[in-house]
């Protein structure tokens, strides 16, 4: 078959005179394909016309992952390590109870596709090869691989220059019993490491990731995990397709949902978009890490603080006795006015000031006017986060209760001073946002309304291991840190229920239906967070294993209003030995408004939620199910009448199924608007730029040589399945195209064009740089090439560029299903 694939494609390309190089081909039960480099981009059109070629996609390059916002502990007694139960994540996920039942992942093989693993770390066994914790794998690229240069593969997947894969492996399988009190979720599982990133700023193209996925499949890994991804919005990328096929075969495939929560809804990542793949969102750990200062003169734990330097220490030498501006801990406007003349010289004190009433800056300046150099603000019920401190003084913020304690000691005349150490100065405290969705975790759904993300796990303030030469331990954040909790949980389930393909296929459903739903905040009467960010909720592996009840399906996909599916059925199965009575209720999540009011661009984080739930009718609100029996309950879900479809409201929630001792749910997701009506191209962003990248004023002429060409710049407000850019005569305008549609020639081919210059498929949307989301994805730019896609040179003449973006769910053959934009006219002249 390999020979047939290569000879079939090569034969057709040679016959057409195409200059190409065949880099790689695959032929397996999972995936048949090839990587082909074309000498001329325009020759991609030939690939589409070769018989039996089903899809042609440009190679996607994925940026290499890094452990973000981390620190290296100094040792087991380092105060920066979480206190009490250091495995707070285990408690959040029910791992502690599963481990009490003897579940450790023994006998389960987990493939980790990442930066490699430092297997010399004691918690990973110290050795590599059969019989060891890190039993196999391969380095597919080599240390010096950047994503663009030659690969130097070998059989040793060690990583001692990045650490991301080691951190992931530690969350999954680190041995217990070390001095830190840390262990992985499935410490007896076996790891196969597939290194796809080099050292430094490495990236990995599609084909390397596909190689790793197929290698993990060949090595019989029951679970495969990838903490990587790139914004895509569609479920059809090459890596997504391969991951989907592995999942369909019964392999558990878990992939990080991505760290672009700031970009808003409809920004899902590949390859996590794959159907059947478990896409993992992040919630905050129940414990958070902060810098702390030491108290002298009293017995007290280090006191946590925040300041503008994040987890960096405050650099203040010496000890400072306390001075409180006010003895009243409920005072409003503390230090908002100049301090009284009776105030002593504050240069040697740590001045205590209550937050609120005016800006931090105003308070700091008033303290500085009395010589103050160090200010300890204490909270007044607001968010415990760094404020807009100025350089008038060194300033930190402590929690309400801590500030009240300091004031109380001052009032009592207790001789207390504070010291800000450079090292050993972090502490773990209960996180105010513990269990809530992390601000960075990416929103779904996909552009074709698939349910992403699938599930959530802790991904902020996560303690795990690092390469020995990089410090051995580190606390990090990101969906990369959330993701490995899920393959480890899957290993416990496979150990408990049997490592079969049928169990593997059931794990996504087991985790989703037994998860805990997540609120949007900790305040009373708060809405549940949209399923488009939390998935089915925070996983609980103990419930997934030991609940006697199962419900299916785990997801109800309602689609958009133009394709709405209102009638559904839920099957409840009682695998216990006694009859159970279940009550079914509708638990709505907040309806997320994906687009800004009065605009076509997506809302950025936090995506606003409104209390406008779907209308749900449950056929039987109470059912009795005998042991070993199943009952089907019909559900009808419709969008409410009150929604504004122009804001693309995302409806979601849960059908809760509760017995006396178990609580499960089925998650649903739909759109209270027609996706076909969503505008794709932002018309206010369309610009024609000259060769100097300045606004084209109509007087320029272009030779299309050495960069002398016009550039069209535009923004995609939503993703599109087909983006086509053609050159048309300068006489063609939007009116002419509209006449073609009106006169019954509503076909894409009926539009008169000179030739195509771009024909892209499955394009994701852009960011909104007006919200501070600057970067390579803030807009699209296309500089006019010298040739059409078929290789024909562009001749001198008067032209425009015609942009056509297919509306979501639109028919590619119909011109009316495409948005149309035409640039101003410009002239191409001969360079001779």
Image (cartoon, rainbow, N blue to C red):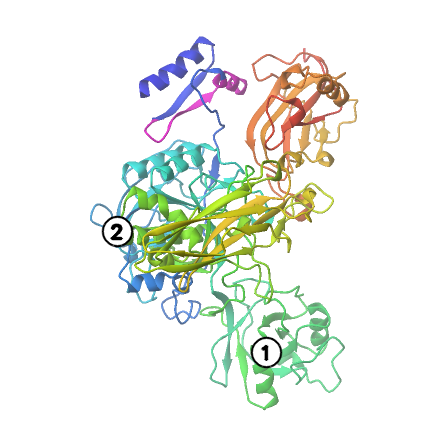
Q: Would residue 141 be seen by someone viewing this image from the given angle?
A: no
**Seen from this angle, which residue lies furthest left?**
131
Marking on residue 596: none
Q: Residues within 10 Å of mark 1 (few under 14, many from 20)?
A: many
Q: In this rendering, would 211 be left or right of 421?
A: left
Stretch of the chain drawn in magenta: 27-48
**Where, quadrant-wise, is the N terminus in this rendering?**
top left
Location of mark 1 (residue): 403
Could you say which is closer to the camera, residue 18 or residue 631? Answer: 631
Q: Position of residue 160 (x, y in %)?
A: 35, 49
Q: Would residue 679 be seen by someone viewing this image from the given angle?
A: yes
Q: State the separation of the CA atoms marked 2 and 1.
A: 48 Å
Could you say which is closer to the camera, residue 1 or residue 626? Answer: 626
Q: Determine if the magenta segment contains residue 35.
A: yes
Does the CB distance between marks 2 and 1 fall below 8 Å?
Answer: no
Q: Residues within 10 Å of mark 2 (few under 14, many from 20)?
A: many
As helix, strand or loop, the secondary structure at mark 1 comes to helix
**Where, quadrant-wise, is the C terminus in this rendering?**
top right
Q: Quadrant of residue 138?
A: top left
Q: In this rendering, would 345 be left or right of 567?
A: right
307 shown above or below 184: below
As helix, strand or loop, the secondary structure at mark 2 comes to loop
Could you say which is closer to the camera, residue 781 or residue 458? Answer: 458
Q: Determine if the magenta segment contains residue 653.
A: no
Could you say which is closer to the camera, residue 108 or residue 174? Answer: 108
Q: Position of residue 601 (x, y in %)?
A: 67, 42
Location of mark 2 (residue): 133
- Residue at 64 percent across and 65 percent down: it is 387
């Amino acid at each position: 078959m390999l020979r047939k694939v290569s000879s079939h494609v090569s034969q057709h390309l040679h016959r057409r005179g195409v200059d190409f190089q065949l880099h790689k081909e695959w032929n397996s039960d999972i995936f048949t394909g090839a990587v082909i480099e074309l000498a001329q981009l325009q020759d991609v059109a030939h690939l589409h016309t070769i018989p039996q070629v089903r899809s042609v996609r440009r190679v996607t390059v994925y940026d290499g992952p890094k452990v973000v916002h981390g620190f290296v502990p100094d040792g087991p007694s380092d105060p920066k390590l979480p206190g009490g139960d250091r495995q707070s994540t285990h408690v959040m996920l029910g791992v502690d109870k599963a481990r009490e039942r003897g579940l450790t992942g023994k006998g389960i093989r987990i493939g980790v596709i990442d930066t490699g693993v430092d297997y010399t770390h004691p918690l990973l066994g110290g050795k590599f090869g059969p019989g060891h914790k890190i039993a196999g794998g391969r380095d597919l690229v080599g240390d010096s691989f950047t994503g663009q240069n030659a690969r130097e593969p070998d059989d040793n997947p060690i990583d001692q220059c990045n650490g991301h894969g080691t951190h992931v492996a530690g969350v999954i399988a680190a041995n217990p019993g070390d001095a830190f009190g840390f262990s992985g979720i499935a410490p007896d599982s076996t790891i196969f490491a597939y290194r796809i990133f080099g050292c430094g700023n490495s990236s990995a193209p599609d084909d390397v990731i596909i190689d790793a996925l197929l290698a993990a499949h060949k090595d019989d890994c029951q679970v495969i995990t990838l903490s990587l991804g790139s914004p895509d919005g569609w479920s059809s990328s090459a890596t997504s397709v391969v991951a989907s096929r592995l999942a369909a075969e019964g392999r558990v495939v878990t992939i990080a949902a991505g760290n672009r929560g700031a970009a808003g809804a409809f920004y899902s990542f590949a390859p996590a978009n794959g159907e059947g793949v478990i896409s993992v969102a992040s919630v905050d750990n129940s414990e958070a890490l902060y810098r702390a200062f030491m108290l002298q003169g009293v017995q007290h734990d280090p006191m946590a603080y925040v300041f503008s330097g994040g987890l960096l220490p405050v650099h203040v030498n010496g000890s400072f006795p306390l001075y409180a501006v006010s003895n009243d801990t409920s005072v409003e406007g503390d230090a908002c006015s100049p301090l009284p003349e009776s105030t002593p010289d504050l240069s040697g004190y740590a001045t205590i000031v209550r937050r609120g009433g005016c800006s931090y800056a105003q308070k700091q300046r008033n303290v500085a006017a009395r010589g103050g150099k160090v200010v300890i603000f204490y909270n007044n019920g607001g968010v415990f986060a760094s404020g807009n401190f100025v350089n008038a003084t060194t300033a930190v913020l402590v929690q309400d209760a801590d500030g009240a304690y300091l004031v109380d000691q001052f009032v009592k005349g207790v001789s207390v001073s504070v010291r800000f150490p450079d090292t050993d100065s972090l502490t773990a405290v209960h996180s105010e946002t513990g269990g809530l969705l992390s601000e960075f975790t990416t929103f779904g759904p996909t552009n074709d309304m698939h349910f992403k993300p699938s599930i959530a796990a802790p991904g902020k303030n996560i303690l795990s291991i690092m390469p020995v030469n990089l410090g051995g331990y580190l606390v990090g954040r990101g969906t990369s840190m959330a993701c490995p909790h899920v393959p480890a949980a899957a290993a416990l389930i496979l150990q408990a229920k049997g490592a079969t393909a049928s169990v593997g296929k059931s794990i996504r459903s087991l985790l989703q239906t037994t998860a805990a739903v997540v609120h949007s905040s900790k305040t009373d009467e708060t809405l549940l967070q949209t399923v488009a960010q939390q998935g089915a909720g925070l996983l609980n592996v103990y419930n997934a294993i030991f609940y006697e009840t199962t419900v299916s399906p785990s997801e109800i996909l309602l689609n958009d209003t133009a394709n709405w599916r209102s009638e559904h059925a839920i099957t409840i199965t009682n695998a216990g030995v006694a009859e159970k009575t279940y009550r079914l209720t509708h638990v709505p999540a907040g309806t997320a408004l994906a687009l800004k009011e009065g605009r076509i661009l997506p809302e950025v984080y936090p995506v606003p939620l409104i209390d406008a739930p779907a209308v749900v009718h449950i056929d039987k609100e109470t059912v009795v199910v005998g042991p070993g029996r199943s009952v089907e309950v019909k559900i009808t879900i419709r969008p409410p009448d009150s929604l504004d479809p122009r804001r693309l409201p995302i409806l979601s929630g849960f059908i809760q199924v509760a017995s006396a001792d178990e609580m499960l749910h089925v998650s649903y997701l739909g759109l209270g608007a027609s996706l076909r009506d969503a505008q794709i191209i932002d018309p206010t962003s369309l610009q024609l730029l000259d060769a100097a990248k300045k606004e084209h004023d109509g007087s320029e002429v272009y030779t299309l040589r050495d960069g002398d060409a016009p550039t069209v710049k535009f923004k995609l407000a939503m993703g599109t399945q087909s983006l086509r850019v053609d050159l048309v005569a300068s006489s063609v305008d939007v009116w002419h195209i509209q006449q073609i549609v009106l006169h019954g020639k509503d076909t894409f081919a009926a539009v008169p064009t000179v030739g195509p210059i771009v024909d892209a498929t499955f394009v994701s949307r852009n960011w909104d740089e007006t919200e501070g989301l600057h970067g390579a994805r803030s807009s699209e730019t296309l500089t006019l090439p010298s040739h059409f896609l078929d290789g024909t040179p562009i001749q001198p003449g008067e032209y425009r560029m015609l942009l056509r973006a297919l509306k979501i769910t639109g028919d590619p053959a119909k011109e009316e299903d495409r948005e149309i934009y035409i640039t101003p006219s410009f002239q191409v002249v001969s360079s001779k």
